[in-house]
Amino acid sequence: MKKTYSLFISVILVFALLPHRTRTLGQGQPSSDKSNLRILILEGTPYERGLQHGKSLKQEIHALVDLWKADIEQKYKTEANVFIKKFLEYSDFPKAIKRWTPELLEEVRGIADGAELDYDTIFAFQLVDEMWVMGAEILGSDHKMTADHCTTIGIRKSKHGPSMVSQNLDIPTFYHGFQTLLHINEPESGLQTMLFTFPGFIAANGLNSSSVAVVVNAVQQLEHSRDGLPVAFVIRGILQKKTYKEAVKFIRTIHFGAPQNYMIGDPENVGSFECSASHVEEFSPYPGSLFTYHTNHPLKNKHFTPEIQNIFKSRNIDPKEYTFQCQRFEALQKILKKNDTEISIEKLKDIFRDRETIINNQGTFGTTIMVLSENSELHISSGRPDEVPFQIFRFEGFHSNLH
């Protein structure tokens, strides 16, 4: 049977054709080469998978944690270990994780042990979005670390083609050069999962072998919680589900730490869900739309932070009538305004490559496109997509060489 690629073949190609960029599987060094993509296969119990992750990417994890701590100190003018201690004392995320995704605490513990770093540091390292929205509260500061550039696009199955869920992932530039693909075999669920991420971090977005996919946008204007489920753990929780219906039921059951828009898809369905601390609202551009898209502004969920509500009050704005807008969102409104618009995967890639709309910008860490069908594909550009070619990965034929 003819295939575009199997994931196994792709791994061989990455390491055979780019030996100067990457050493052996799981042992690549941090590189400034934008096309570098580390690929790591993890198996066994949650703790064993974390241990493999931590050991295989130990040097990268140490390097990235150092950069992360330096960024904390620069932003908050506080010694990083002091900030981490205060942050963990201020919050109670383990309670929610133990309730809804308990096995992931063991995976994080394995990463810490494998990388030979203390558990609190690696646990706090998972709380990217939570620190962005709560860091200032901890220190009584008015400075917030913002994340306002990610763009997601979902396309429902139609006569034009299969369902697709996609994201331009924009994060602080100190993460750049550490692009990583994790392939996880989970004997407890019978699922395989492909996760786009960086060393030491459990997930930025991903796709499972039941063709359930998730991508995300920060929506920091919405309410957050000190004891909800953190974003990375929500992503992994979604990817433990075998259908879109199960995944949506999961997000409608849990409570959230940082506010986030979760775009979820499977071969038959795609939906975009704005989630504040305890409220979930589905956004659709227009009734019956084949498309959904999102940037970093809530469009349906009106459960704003007290800070935003005070701004509305001072300006005599009715929160229920207010709609946030941005250049990237307006560009997508024009492109995806009619159901008869045909968006092929190449057209979708062109949308993400466009710099004029600033969908593609200096914060772009990578672009992922999940094509959802019986034999789903994950397309990854591990950098700015107009500079770094897309690689294609499939679950079929993927075998681990870690034992």
Image: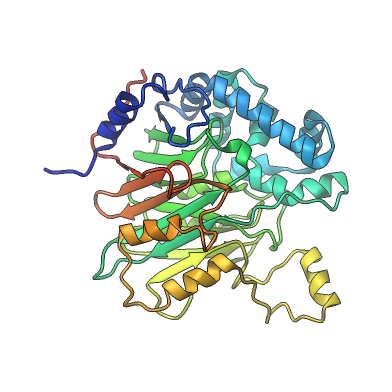
Residue at the extreme left: 1
> How is the model colour-coded?
rainbow
Say which quadrant the C terminus sits in: top left
Q: Which residue: 55% across, 52% down?
A: 361
Q: Is residue 175 above or below residue 307?
A: above
Q: Position of residue 115 (x, y in %)?
A: 58, 20
Q: Nearer the viewer, residue 114 or 77?
A: 77
x, y percent for residue 228: 66, 50
Decide which of 309, 244 is in the foreground and name it: 309
Circle count: 0
Image height check: is 260 above or below 390? below
Q: Is residue 284 visible?
A: no
Residue 52 appears in view: yes
- Residue 123: quadrant of the picture: top right
Q: Residue at x 78, y 31 (%)?
A: 80
Residue 358 in percent (x, y) is at: 55, 59
In-image side of 392 versus 314 (left or right): left
Residue drawn at x 53%, y 35% is 198
Name the image quarter holding residue 315: bottom right
Front-most of 402 and 361? 361
Whether residue 9 sits left or right of residue 72 in the image: it is left
Where, quadrant-wise, is the N terminus in this rendering?
top left
Task: Note whether 165 is above or below 181 in the view shown.
Answer: below
Q: Vertically, is 290 above or below 392?
A: below
Q: Residue at 77% x, 51% y: name it.
A: 144
* Left or right: 10 as drawn, with respect to 70: left
Residue 313: x and y in percent read: 83, 76
